[in-house]
Amino acid sequence: MSPTEYQDKIWPLRQQLFQVALNILKRPTLAEDAVQEILIKAWEKREEWASLTSWKAWLLTLTRNKSLDYLKSRHNKSQDLEKAPVKVETSANPYEDLESSDLMRKLKIFLETLNPNQKAVFELREFGQMSYAEIATELNITEAQVKVALHRARIALRKKMQTIVDYGK
């Protein structure tokens, strides 16, 4: 891959990658760091791109994994340089923020129970904010298959999430 191809294909995706990282990390500076590392890795692996069936899905997956790695490493560090808490304003009620983050953690666990196709489609649509046509192209399936996989994934996740709500009553 030439620098021009990189700039044409990869560089425009940085905002989408940033959104995926920000959804996971909840801190813009950490999300920027994660995306920067992904963009560097993409450049370093440019010779391998021809063998990838979906480079966009690969980048989104790398971003998700790198973001989760950041979270894990931050929890495992006893000496954290950023000790000052940063509050991300998502609601007026701190209890709602806590409940929302707990539900997101459970959603990520439930995502692992989906079949790989449903999981990929769901992540690309919900976290990657891709259209049905883009997902179909990236995964080399039809738009109808994307819609079916997304529908089934949402039903499965809804059932699993409903068990949490029912249990809390």
Image (cartoon, grey):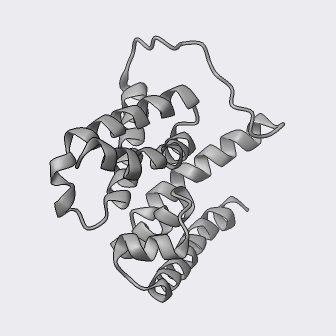
Q: Please, is residue 17 above or below residue 53 in the view?
A: above
Work out whether residue 152 or residue 160 is closer to the camera in this orientation and state it: 152
Q: Please say whether residue 114 is visible from this viewpoint.
A: no
Relative horizontal placement of residue 110, taking residue 99 as reference (left or right): left
In the rendered image, the quadrant that contains the C terminus is bottom right
In the image, residue 85 sits, relative to residue 103, either above or below, namely above
Whether residue 46 is visible = yes
Task: Name the residue furthest front.
Answer: 4
- From the viewer's perspective, is 50 left or right of 122? left
Report the front residue among 133 and 71: 133
At 38% across and 69% down in the image, what residue appears? 138
Q: Position of residue 129 (x, y in %)?
A: 56, 60
Residue nearer the viewer, 60 or 68: 60
Residue drawn where x is 48% and y is 55% of the image: 108
Residue at (37, 60) in percent of width and height: 57
Q: Residue at x 79, y 40 (%)?
A: 91
Residue 106 falls left or right of residue 5:
right
Q: Seen from this angle, which residue lies furthest bottom?
A: 144
Image coordinates for residue 53, horizontal then vertical, percent: 25, 68
